[in-house]
Amino acid sequence: MSDTPPAPATTGKDPVSISPSPRLPLLIVMLSATLLPLPLRPWPTLVVGLFGLFLLVQTYSLRLEFTADTLMVWRGQNELRRFPYTEWQSWRLFAAWLPGLLYFREVNSIHFLPILFNPAELREQLVQRVGALETPKPRETAD
């Protein structure tokens, strides 16, 4: 018998998947309809509309999963990419109300991802997992 107390049922570090949000793709599809009056019609409408449909398919085929030490991107049951938090230098959500873009910088690369997921859940997990990196730390000055 061990003297250590049992671990709490929820530690806040359990894997969490972010639910999809079709707001951005649907906004782009609606925007494409407003391009019909342009002189080159219907090409701008078709190009922007097809891009919106592509993002809509991606919304429901991709999944973001936050684990204790890694952001994982899944397509169905296939893992596409891992982003370990130890390599993150900063992150920011641009126009999350729209929703817009997730920017994050790793040691060797920069990533911009369209927010195809629930922006509130995404922000909550980013703050919980890598929150200290949301804004640049102030530089220390020599006195």
Image (spheres, helix red, strand yellow):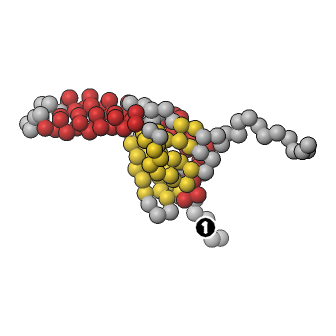
Say which quadrant the C terminus sits in. bottom right
Q: Where is residue 142 in the image (x, y as percent from the top left)?
A: 63, 71
Which residue lies at the image location 58% right of the left edge and 58% below the top edge? Answer: 86
Q: Where is residue 119 in the image (x, y as percent from the top left)?
A: 48, 35
Question: Would residue 108 appear left or right of 53 to someone viewing this image?
Answer: right
Residue 95 placement: quadrant: top left
Question: Would residue 47 appear left or right of 121 to someone viewing this image?
Answer: left
Instruction: Report whether residue 136 is seen.
Output: no
Question: Would residue 59 appear left or right of 88 to someone viewing this image?
Answer: left
Give the secondary structure at mark 1. loop
Which residue lies at the image location 23% right of the left edge and 34% below the top edge? Answer: 49
Question: What is the residue that sits farthest to the left in this orientation?
Answer: 39
Q: Position of residue 106 (x, y in %)?
A: 49, 58
Q: Residues within 10 Å of mark 1 (few under 14, many from 20)?
A: few
From the viewer's side, name the closer residue of 48 and 74. Answer: 74
Question: Would residue 1 appear left or right of 18 to someone viewing this image?
Answer: right
Q: Three-letter amino acid code at disc 1?
A: Thr
- Reply above or below: 23 against 73: above
Residue marked by disc 1:
141
Q: Where is residue 69 in the image (x, y as percent from the top left)?
A: 61, 51
Which residue lies at the image location 26% right of the left edge and 28% below the top edge? Answer: 30
